[in-house]
Image (cartoon, rainbow, N blue to C red):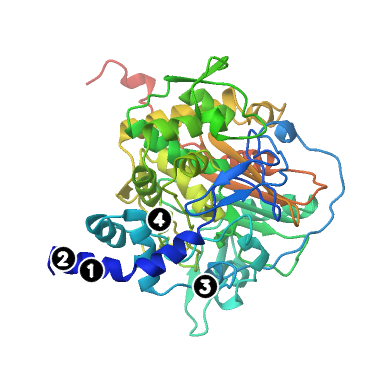
Amino acid sequence: MTIRRRLLSAAALLPLALLLGAQEPVAGGASAEASAASDSGAVAPGTVLPGKDSLAVVSRAESVADGGADAGQAPGAHAGGGGTLASPASMGGEDGGTRPEADAVAAAAVQGGTDAGLTTLVTVPGLVPPAPVPSRLTAPPMAKLQTMPRAADLLARAKLQGERLVVKEKDGHTRALTVDPVLQASLTKILRDYETPYGVAVVLEPSTGRVLALAEHSQAQPELRGLPYRAVFPAASIFKIVTGSALLEAGVTPTMEECFHGGKRRLTEKHLEDSERDGACYSLALAMGKSANVIFAKLTQKHLSADTLRRMAARFHFNREIDFVVPTDVSLAAVPEDGFALANTGAGFGDVYMSPLHGALVAAVAANDGRWVDPVLVEPEQGSLLPPEGERVLTPEAAKALTDMLEATVTHGTARGIFRERNFRVDSAVGKTGTLADRNPFRDYSWFVGFAPRDNPRVAVAALIVNDPKWRIRGTWLGREALRLGLERVPAPVELTAPASAAGKH
């Protein structure tokens, strides 16, 4: 095909591309329909958020800061919320449908511009969302939750045989699951005892991908199953792991400082400008630990392009299928081209959704020296499960730097209080918190993803709690418990030492 024909082909898609661009959700955290909060603040009432083809005015925002409520358990009885669990096909948007392949090409035309850019976006996995990305402001996908069919829910069909959970198929064939029954029961009991409206805890062994727990509970909708696999939850500041990785590759070091002012409760374009009012400075590592939205927004604007952030997200398996025995939603991420919208996305305010299983795998990338390892739920019929080569996401050096940044969350940042709680400490843990809220109806999403120990990781976790206005625990507290209990079930390897009688012998 000649260059001229390629350009004509792209031009033929222009009307649809313009239509898609006009419908593209604006960046930010709230609207008149749904109010959102990020880890260190939210968009202020009356803030104007620029989109690709239009402007949207935020009428109100609820502020939920990382830290604060996560410092422990808060009093308050549970009051159930609404919602229905969505299948992958219903993740499309307000109409719940999916676009044909031509629509994805049109979207690529909007994002890529030139013919070469369009071709690259279409052919590289993850650069183009495989389905329309819902607007969190007008069509939060959690509103379409549906329960998982029992036939696909291996864990629900498993029976305890000895110390293993085993699934017996209709043909008589049995499959042993990797899930640890004790750990699974302990985490499920926590979710039930605290009557979490929607709660999930995923624990896995990062080196092999062996899934050790997929605990879930919904007090609001007790019939719901499949929450660990549903990508209907805003990724919030967990997406800072992707942004931070892209910044590392762009030459920003963990110790490099950026100065800022304000932005604790809201993020506007003014905050992205260097100013004499910039009275505080954080290193990139401390900004990760404290989940500083302004710094991540400023660094995104200064050092990253949409293409750079989009490619890093794809490497972390956003907009890509996760190879798993249980059907798992694709975690969709929309990365806009516009400056402020792009900065907002880099800070964790964008239209980005993630399943809890995916969250644990994102944390495991740093634990695995920068490699992506697919999750495993069924034990091999013969032999043992060995660590695979995995897909390279980051260089070992970048993975170490990312780990340094994630450690600041626990030592100096938003999870410090939780991890210092007496009798419940988890030594050498690293991780990332995330909080965000919808307003109508009110939903408070709180995340923790991480792993431990730092230098010889044995478990990686993701914990998510979706609360209504009255809550008892949040994601950081659950994440710490998932790490603590997981480490008890996966003991450290025994170090072999030579007997004393062998000293001096060769």
Question: Label 4, label 2: how many angstroms apart (C-alpha)?
Answer: 42 Å
> Where the N terminus falls, by quadrant?
bottom left
> Where the C terminus falls, by quadrant?
top left
430 w.r.t. 384: above or below: above
Q: Amino acid at mark 3?
A: Ala
- Give whichever of discs 4 and 1 has the lower sequence position: 1
Verify CB contact (< 8 Å) between mark 2 and mark 1: yes
Q: Amino acid at mark 2?
A: Arg
For marks 4 and 1, give the one nearer the viewer: 1
Can you identify the residue that label 2 sits on?
Answer: 4
Q: Residue at x 50, y 82 (%)?
A: 172
Question: Label 3, label 4: how many angstroms apart (C-alpha)?
Answer: 22 Å
- Give whichever of discs 3 and 1 has the lower sequence position: 1
For marks 3 and 4, give the one nearer the viewer: 3
Q: Is residue 3 left or right of residue 32?
A: left
Q: Residues within 10 Å of mark 1 (few under 14, many from 20)?
A: few
Label ID, residue 89: 3
36 w.r.t. 41: above or below: below
Label ID, residue 502: none
Furthest toward the bottom, the residue is: 171
User: Could you say where residue 501 lies in the image, as x and y percent from the top left?
Assistant: 35, 20
Verify CB contact (< 8 Å) between mark 3 and mark 2: no
Label ID, residue 374: 4
